[in-house]
Amino acid sequence: MTNPYIPMKAEIVSIKTETRDIKTFRLKPLGGKLKFEAGQFVEVSVFGVGEAPISISSDPDVDDYFELSVRRVGSVTGALFKLSEGAIIGVRGPYGRGWPLKESEGMDVLIVGGGCGAAPLRPAILKLLRSRDRYGRIELLYGARTPSDVMYMEEFEAIAEGSGCRVLLTVDTIAPDNRWRYSVGVVTSLFDKISVNPFRSVALVCGPEIMMMYAVRDLLRLGFKPENIYLSMERRMRCGLGFCGHCQIGRKYVCLDGPVFSYSEIAPMPDKIV
Amino acid sequence: MSVVGSMNTFIADLHDLDRLVEVARSRYSVYAPVRRGRGYVFSKIEGMSDTDLRYNRTILPPTKIFHRPKEVLLRFQLADGPEFGEVVEVEPMMIFGVHACDLNAILRLDRFFTRRFEDPYYLARRRGSVVVALNCNGPRDEYCFCASLGTGPTVYGGYDILLTEVRDRMFLVEAGSEIGANLIDEARFRRASMSDMEAKKAVASTAKREFRRYADFRSLSYPVIEVLAHTVWDEEADKCFSCGNCSLVCPTCYCYEIYDTLDMDLNSGFRVRRLDSCQLYGYAEVALGGNFRKSRKARLRHWMVCKFGGAAGGELSSCVGCGRCIFYCPARIDITSVASRLREAV
Ligand SMILES: Cc1cc2nc3c(=O)[nH]c(=O)nc-3n(C[C@H](O)[C@H](O)[C@H](O)COP(=O)(O)OP(=O)(O)OC[C@H]3O[C@@H](n4cnc5c(N)ncnc54)[C@H](O)[C@@H]3O)c2cc1C
Ligand code: SF4
Ligand code: SF4
């Protein structure tokens, strides 16, 4: 019996600062590869501090490295921020059910991200663009608090340059001296501008739960079907294996049944905002 | 029902059972209910005089012998590393005198810990041990309600050895596994007579009729709106202390927290797991001050719906009617009366 609690070692090969509190760590798995699907996550170990679930944010078709985009909020993420290139951490996984990319072929795709929620969406975007001809229109809406909180800025601008995907960016507020070429307002204010057809479109949504609540409300109003709205849910989570119990939402385990759920699956469950 | 058949049905008094314990002790640590203060605990015994087979219930259930309240998962070292490896503490055990409710809880956790992934810690201890189950001749006290849930008072499978008290301190002994049969063989019991076997049937049929406490948890589940919105949760939450006793003593509560501890040398340490409870505030806490079960009502409701079998653990974390949570609740919150309030609404 292999022990699922034992992590695999991974070396930090590079670190990119995304925003004042988000960094992207590129990791090389030592002794094995990490095969994953867009939207899955790993449990990251900093020994002596603990473990935290973090989404894999890189391209699922690249397997000599993978990336984690981490927001500094507590002990494990804080400890990760203190590490530099060459440091060895532990990872186990990948875990969970990712985005329904195969099932969405032939449809339009609307991607809605808020803040750090861009991390689990990035592999989906990269994967969708790689098999661009299998989908209808693709649009990406992303919102952050201020211009300096926008993740993956150059990458989003590069995607916008290409022809495959429309990109709409927004921030909640800008300082008077700030240069910002895009919209101002919450991410749902971009819904006026979308061109996907709500009746034959899936929506992939990730962000703070309060943002997802407003997004779902507006998407339903626009005519999206509840079963076509997909949300990546976050809960306290310890094991990632369906044992420790913390990530339950009603009858669902985020780690096994999610983290990606259709709105119709999750809507009737208690103890959530969305 | 014994899988080995009536040829392998025996009769034993306490002296005979002493021989069984003696034989078992050469291979296993034998744990049985031992009086501790006003309660009982599963504790190591040397012979039948250490245990009381008429015990009502142990404070902690035998599932928590296999799924320990606290244990080390991994050992690690930071210098030139990190380096890490598993720590699995296994002691071959005989758990002696397990009631039907508790045996059913063990069988549920067996399935729970082998779903998508396998938990090597639970399984190593469980697979290396033998269970001697003990049929109940009726409710052990007014808190028992296994009969209405179908989890007792009589055991049907899942044991290595099964005991039924057919006459005053005379036990019918049946083997349920090869290991159990061999142990019985070595203990050299007398074969049971036809009348002993008939006596067992009589015990089983009268036992289930003596229960006063009753529960029906069917369809008390997420996301049934009548269950979620019922006012009983407000009333009970007003009384609840959020102490977590109920889940600590529950045989099918398994939730745990994982954390690292570092030694004084700041180099070596352990990754530890410790039982947690959804009744405690910190259980559903997330980063930046978020908590999806901030209110006591949401926590109490989640715990009970889980015990009804209506949360993510489904049947595998559901109640087996042992009565512990009712007995040990300082607020006298009673899962059976909450359920009957809810039943009126569904
Ligand atoms: C499926 C999934 C994917 C995720 N993906 C990402 C991602 O890609 N990027 C990202 O940045 N984050 C992600 N997260 C969130 C991340 O896992 C959490 O922010 C995590 O808490 C960070 O761990 P930490 O040790 O740094 O924080 P912690 O030290 O756990 O602190 C976070 C907060 O949790 C509470 N807390 C923690 N431990 C305890 C305790 N023992 N007792 C009481 N309260 C406690 C405190 O309120 C604290 O403020 C994801 C979460 C999930 C479930
Ligand atoms: S034992 Fe009683 S008071 Fe304590 S958490 Fe459980 S229900 Fe609440
Ligand atoms: S919920 Fe209460 S009565 Fe039911 S198994 Fe758990 S502790 Fe026993």
Image (tube, rainbow, N blue to C red):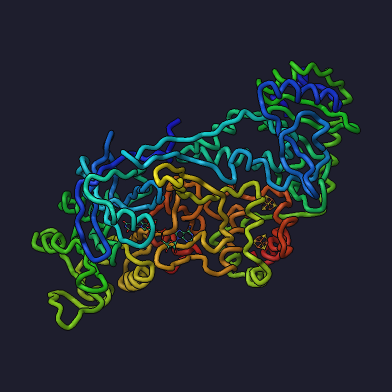
Quadrant of the picture in which ligand 2 is shown: bottom right
Q: Which residue is at a point 75% across and 55% down the rendered structure image?
A: B327
Q: Is residue B20 above or below residue B54?
A: above
Q: Residue furthest front?
A: B265
Q: Which residue is at a point 62% across and 64% down the rendered structure image?
A: B242
Frontmost residue, A133 versus B183: B183
Q: Position of residue B132 (x, y in %)?
A: 72, 31
Q: Quadrant of the C terminus of chain B?
A: bottom right
Q: Is residue B155 above or below residue B252?
A: above
Q: Is residue B299 above or below residue B258?
A: below
Q: Position of residue A265 (x, y in %)?
A: 43, 58
Q: Which residue is at a point 67% across and 64% down the rendered structure image?
A: B342
Q: Position of residue A119 (x, y in %)?
A: 27, 58
- With B324 as the anchor, is A205 left or right in this view? left
- With A6 as the anchor, is B189 left or right in this view? right
Give the quadrant of residue A176: bottom left
Q: Which residue is at a point 72% across and 55% down the rendered structure image?
A: B215
Q: Position of residue A171 (x, y in %)?
A: 23, 74
Give the quadrant of residue B47: top right
